[in-house]
Image: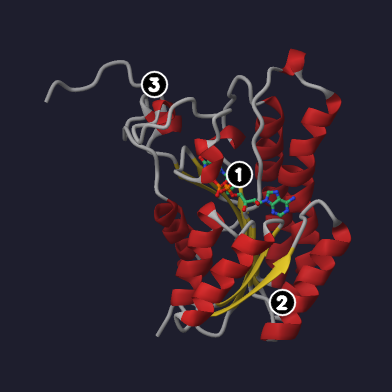
Amino acid sequence: MGKLDGQVALISGGARGQGEAQARLFAREGAAVALGDVLEEDGQRVAESINDTGGQAMFQKLDVTEASSWQSMVDESVSQFGRLDIVINNAGIARVNLIEDSTLQDYLDVILVNQLGVWLGMKTAIPALKEAGGGCIINTSSTAGLEGYSGLGAYVSSKFAVRGMTKVAALELAPYNIRVNSVHPGPIDTPMIRDPQIQRTDDDDFDIAGTAPIPRVGHVDEVAKMMLFIAADATYSTGAEFVIDGGVTAGTMVARPRD
Ligand SMILES: NC(=O)c1ccc[n+]([C@@H]2O[C@H](COP(=O)([O-])OP(=O)(O)OC[C@H]3O[C@@H](n4cnc5c(N)ncnc54)[C@H](O)[C@@H]3O)[C@@H](O)[C@H]2O)c1
């Protein structure tokens, strides 16, 4: 018996990184997973490998900034698997530049994917979730939705917005038995954080995690397990913020114990 037997989960940005790990775990727990991403080859490969190992998966090209792309993603998921129960708005991008040096387009590029993409995902999926009698939306924010980071003005703006729109959707959708929560990862080891613009070393011992109380980056499976908990077990949580950051937002480590 899987925790998600009979359920259908749509995951944006499912071609790699955290989305891929979530897709694999949800499929192992019995869900049929619909993966959407702009990376078609990677997405197809993940879906095929889930199907080859006894799971149920489909991939469709999805650009989260396009309303029509979202509509066809939701329609195809329902048409292939019969219903929609869970949506993980996971797709995202990060760009590093100071506000003073950023162009309007730099700002909009991030806002369109990280902020508009989540809003469109929720809006488009709501009728199918209602049709299923209820469900669960999980929006991937960040610790950058809880505190500021220099050089990440657009990213931080978008992730604070995701945290806010999650609460609005939670209020609006509770009457329909649809829970909506946000997840706030700290540094997680994915291609995003290994981007040289964000992480200047190839070391496994990332600088970015050096000051965290738990002094390492997080693993994608750790985030996937939290997503599974929210989808399957957190039945009294909606409008909530689930933080998974090694203690980054707990405060500042001034001194560490000697032993
Ligand atoms: N890695 C971290 O440290 C970290 C920390 C906090 C939050 N996050 C968030 O977690 C989520 C997943 O990121 P990740 O770490 O797995 O990085 P990633 O770059 O490996 O994965 C992001 C995925 O989103 C996809 N994507 C980008 N633009 C898209 C678009 N327009 N339409 C559809 N898909 C698109 C990418 O192709 C990629 O597959 C993102 O929202 C990110 O902001 C990451």
Circle 1 SS class: loop
Task: Please state which of residues 21 and 230 is positioned toward the viewer in this rendering.
Answer: 21
Q: Is residue 157 above or below residue 191?
A: above
Task: Please state which of residues 62 and 235 is positioned toward the viewer in this rendering.
Answer: 62
Q: Viewer-nearest of labels 2 and 3?
A: 2
The extreme top residue here reads: 100
- Quadrant placement of the C terminus: top left
Q: Answer yes or no: do the residues labelled 1 and 3 have beta carbons within 8 Å?
A: no
Q: Amino acid at mark 3?
A: Thr
Circle 2 SS class: helix
Disc 1 to disc 2, how far (Cα)? 24 Å
Disc 1 to disc 3, how far (Cα)? 21 Å
Q: Is residue 136 left or right of residue 109?
A: left
Residue drawn at (83%, 68%) of the image = 71
Q: Amino acid at mark 2?
A: Ser
Q: Name the disc covering residue 77, or none.
A: 2
> Could you say which quadrant of the image residue 149 lies in?
top right
Res. 250 visible in picture: yes
Name the residue tied to disc 3. Answer: 252
Please name the colour scheme applied to the rendered image: secondary structure
Measuring from the top left, give residue 173's x and y in whole percent.
72, 63
Circle 3 SS class: loop
Q: Name the disc covering residue 141, or none.
A: 1
Q: Is residue 42 above or below residue 189?
A: below
Disc 1 Cβ-to-ligand 1 distance below 8 Å: yes
Q: Callout 2: 10 Å neighbours few (<14), some, many (20+)?
A: many
Q: Is residue 56 left or right of residue 208?
A: right
- Compare marks 1 and 3 and give the one earlier in the sequence: 1
Q: Is residue 205 above or below residue 132?
A: above
Task: Please state which of residues 49 and 165 is positioned toward the viewer in this rendering.
Answer: 49
Res. 137 visible in picture: no
